[in-house]
Every structure is written in C-alpha cells, then in structure tokens.
Image: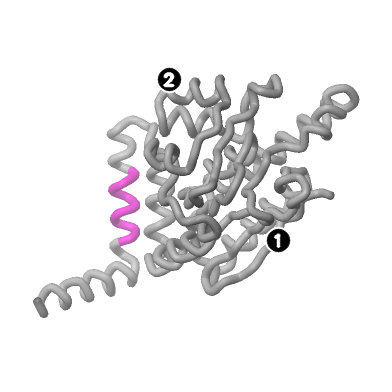
C-alpha cells in the first residue's frame, strides 16, 4: 500500500502525517507531490502559522521503497531520476518555507526519512526514536540533503561516520549532538511539537521568516550577511508588530 500524506488543522498549526504503517510510511512520488502542493497552500494561508510533520503507526518514516528501487535500477533509471527530483523539490520547499516546520518523530526514521526530518526547522523526538542513515547498508549514497545538513550541523568527521557506518542513533544521542531540539516521552512527540508550534505561532510571522532566511544564508561572507541582517532588521522594525511588542515590553518593565 502506498503511503499517503494526510493533513489536519489544529488551531494555527497544520499537521502533515505520513500514513503507510505497513511500510513504516515509506516515501513515494505521490507523497512528494502532495508535500509540495500542501506547503504552497499553507504558505498562502495566513491562518496557518506553523507546520508539524509526523508519521502514523508509531514510526516517522522508513525511507525509500526498496522494492521500487530494485525494479527501477533494472528497468527505468529515468523514472528514478525524476523521483529524486521530486523528493528534492519537497526538501527544498521545506527548507525555504517561511513558517516554522517541526518534525515530530516516533519510532524509526531511516534513510530518506532522516533526510526529511533534517529538512525541518526543528525536531522533537520521542524516547523511542531511532535515526538510521541506512544508505551505505544497501549500497547507496544519501539523498534528500542528508549529507548537506549533517556536514553543517556536525562537521566533516562526525557526518562521515554517520553516513559511512549507518549506525542507529537514539533520540538522546541526537539531542546531545544538537540535531534534535527536544526529547519527549514515548507517544508524546506530536503533543510536544504542537506545543512548540503554538509558542512560535505567537511570534510575528515576518520575523520568523526573516530569521529563517538569515540562518539559511549564513554561509555568505560576513559583510554581505551583516548587510542582509541590517535590511531585515529595518524591514521588521517598520512593521506594526514591532511597535506593539516594544511598547508592551516597555510598559511591563515600567511596572516592575
């Protein structure tokens, strides 16, 4: 059975749920297309202020469908190339999406499922979550930006160790490495992610978008980055939200 991408609105948060428990929510071209389309609609909807991505059936995502890969490597490599393009379009859409995107991970995140979690802005993982860079175990290199994200987050040596060896990593190990934002009790990763999304929904959307852009562009030379920070600071300062927040802060301090 092919995994479906289900959507649910919970207040100002849009929940995207990978639903294909029989295959641990294995990825598919249909999911990629639905993911891009859903993010486009969420970006245009001012009532959606955050997105949470999770999986059904006690697991996040087991990665790609190995049966489909086994078939396509023999019969249709062009189709597989198109599938990778579609997957990478979804990864890019998550990376550039101007609103917060939080992964809520229970159980297994493997291969492309890890790439998908890393493409989100923050990861909330349950105690039982396991992250497995399983590519080398099946004779493959990574996709979905895993090598890019891990190199930036961990440095060259630790990224290579994870990608080469493919050892299973716990939620606590990833939290210590700075890859997971918070660890939740089993079965509560989604609730914790929704609470976090609710906190972020209270912040001005333009500010969150500006900060995400600045972090995404942080590899540019310092002078260029300072110029970008200056422009975004002035842009946000001119918005009503800044005036209201500054005034509220000053009034609160005056009452102390």
Whole-Å distance between the Cαs marked 1 and 2? 37 Å
Which image quarter: residue 39? bottom right
Residue 232 is one of the magenta-drawn residues: yes
Q: Would residue 55 appear left or right of 221 to someone viewing this image?
A: right
6 or 42: which is nearer to us? 6
Residue at 72% x, 37% y: name it.
64
Q: Residues within 10 Å of mark 1 (few under 14, many from 20)?
A: some
162 or 87: which is nearer to us? 162
Name the residue tied to disc 2: 157
Q: Would residue 29 appear left or right of 234 to someone viewing this image?
A: right
Which numbered disc, 1 or 2, marks the residue that appears first in the sequence? Answer: 1
Name the residue tied to disc 1: 6
Residue 149 is one of the magenta-drawn residues: no
Residue at 64% x, 37% y: name it.
112
Per the rendered image, the range of residues in magenta is 228-236
Element type at mark 1: strand
Residue located farthest toward the right when viewing the structure as drawn: 75
Spot occupied by residue 118 in the image (x, y as percentages of width and height): 52, 41
- Quadrant of the rendering where the C terminus is positioned: bottom left
Q: Residues within 10 Å of mark 2 (few under 14, many from 20)?
A: few
Does the image show residue 216? Answer: no
Spot occupied by residue 137 in the image (x, y as percentages of width and height): 66, 23
254 or 74: which is nearer to us? 74
């Amino acid at each position: 059975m092919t995994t479906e991408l289900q959507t649910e609105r919970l207040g100002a948060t849009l929940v995207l749920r990978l639903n294909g428990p029989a295959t641990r929510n294995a990825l598919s071209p249909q999911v990629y297309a639905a993911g891009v389309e859903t993010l486009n609609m969420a970006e245009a909807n001012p009532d959606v202020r955050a997105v949470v991505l999770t999986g059904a059936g006690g697991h996040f995502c087991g990665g790609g469908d190995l049966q489909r890969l086994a078939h396509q490597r023999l019969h249709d490599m062009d189709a597989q190339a198109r599938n990778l393009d579609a997957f990478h379009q979804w990864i890019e859409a998550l990376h550039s999406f101007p609103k917060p995107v939080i992964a809520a991970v229970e159980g297994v995140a493997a291969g492309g499922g890890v790439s998908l979690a890393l493409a989100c802005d923050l990861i909330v993982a349950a105690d039982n979550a396991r992250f497995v860079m399983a590519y080398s175990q099946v004779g493959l290199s990574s996709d979905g930006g895993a090598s890019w994200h891990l190199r930036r987050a961990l440095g060259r040596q630790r990224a290579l160790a994870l990608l080469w060896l493919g050892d299973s990593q716990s939620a606590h190990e990833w939290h210590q490495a700075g890859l997971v934002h918070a660890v939740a009790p089993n079965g509560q990763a989604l609730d914790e992610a929704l609470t976090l999304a609710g906190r972020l929904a209270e912040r001005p959307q333009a500010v969150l978008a500006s900060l995400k852009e600045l972090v995404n562009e942080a590899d540019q030379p310092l002078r260029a980055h300072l110029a970008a920070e200056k422009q975004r600071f002035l842009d946000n300062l001119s918005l009503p939200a800044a005036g209201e927040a500054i005034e509220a802060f000053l009034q609160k301090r005056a009452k102390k």
